[in-house]
Image: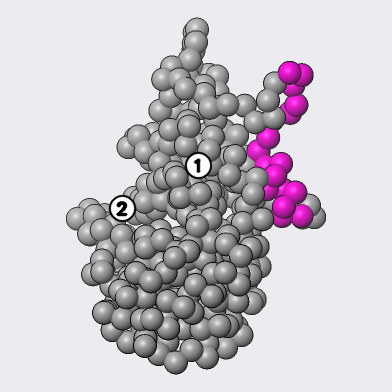
Amino acid sequence: MDSTGDGTRAVRAGLPEPEQFEPTLPGPVFAAHFHLSGEPVGPYTYGRDTNPTWTLLERAIGELEAPGESVETTVFASGMAAISAVLLSQARTGDVVVLPDDGYQALPLVREQLEAYGVEVRTAPTGGDAQLAVLEGAKLLWIETPSNPGLDVCDVRRLVEAAHAAGTLVAVDNTLATPLGQRPLELGADFSVASDTKGLTGHGDILLGHVTCRDAGLAAGVRRWRKVVGAIPGPMEAWLAHRSLATLELRIDRQCATALALAKALGDRPGVTGLRYPGLPTDPSYPNAVRQMRRFGSVVSFVLPDRERAERFLAELRLVDDATSFGGLRSTAERRARWGGDAVPEGFIRFSVGAENAPDLVADVQRALDVALG
């Protein structure tokens, strides 16, 4: 086990060996093709297959996902591309796939596609390890923990043990936690998947996703899927993502600390119900979270009495953008029911804590609540 600290690892992850007069992190390589004589046996042959900028980023993410271990990471143009690559590279007609019914809003779109291919899809909630009840005969179990937007946490080790005993593969969507908060491969998962648009890159300026596997055969299937569908990241996006990893621990530690402070401040607030944050000792997910998570994420959720007061709250915020993503340096919040895809109340707020100073952010939220709730 690599004992290097998270901050040191994040700063150094994926960097090439030093070369005199060369930059520490080489710039993005823009190339559709490479010089190629004879048989195509080199590492770089065509731009849809491989790129040196991807190689460094994939190495860096792998070092964060499983420090000191041999793993393979494949980067994609978006989180949805990464999700699709795992599900559609593994499932065949007649197979069974188990998904969470309270997960990422776009999962129903994937379900429709799987069912169109003749794959049976079963769903169950994240909380209470409910997916165990529908696991029999499944080819693949998809876990999302903490779930988005409800922030339920399941016992990954328990689900993995049951799945593997039945011959079922396990993928964990680790977007909300990031590898600094939770390492799915260490918990036994076969695939660790994330939308790196969110906390991993953290600046709200690129779309990216990744899949990391220990098993070379599973990784090859994922990488082949990327090649077939062409879901590749641009070299500039990959380079920006690698650059952003250097501040990962700094960002995540600030965000998690402030998220906990905000959750505590909201705990006694009249008019605020349904408060959820996995790092709050009173949260239903805390017992599972404290066993398997090293940091508890930047997202806090809560419910205001109705749509009107939720909209008023969002409009009154001065340090928070009304936006649909999470995990960025700038705090964002949204009334999640506006999308219509999540089973949440009209006044449900998903709040993503940024890197602002905690007293400033908490004061802004309290002031906006004063106005919204009267």
Q: Residue at x 43, y 36 (%)?
A: 233
Coordinates of residue 73 in the picture (x, y in percent): 55, 44
Taking 298 as reference, is 79 left or right? Answer: left
- Say what secondary structure mark 2 lies in: loop
- Say what secondary structure mark 1 lies in: strand
**What residue is pinned by disc 2?**
92
Q: Amino acid at mark 1?
A: Thr
Identity of the residue furthest to the left in this view: 116
Coordinates of residue 300 in the picture (x, y in percent): 49, 74
The image's mark for residue 74 is 1
Q: Amino acid at mark 2?
A: Arg
Q: Nearer the viewer, residue 305 or 131?
A: 305
Identity of the residue furthest to the right in this view: 3
Q: Residue at x 58, y 26 (%)?
A: 27
Q: Is residue 220 above or below residue 120?
A: above
Q: Is 16 one of the magenta-colored residues?
A: yes
Q: Nearer the viewer, residue 366 or 338?
A: 366
| Start-end of magenta stretch | 5-21
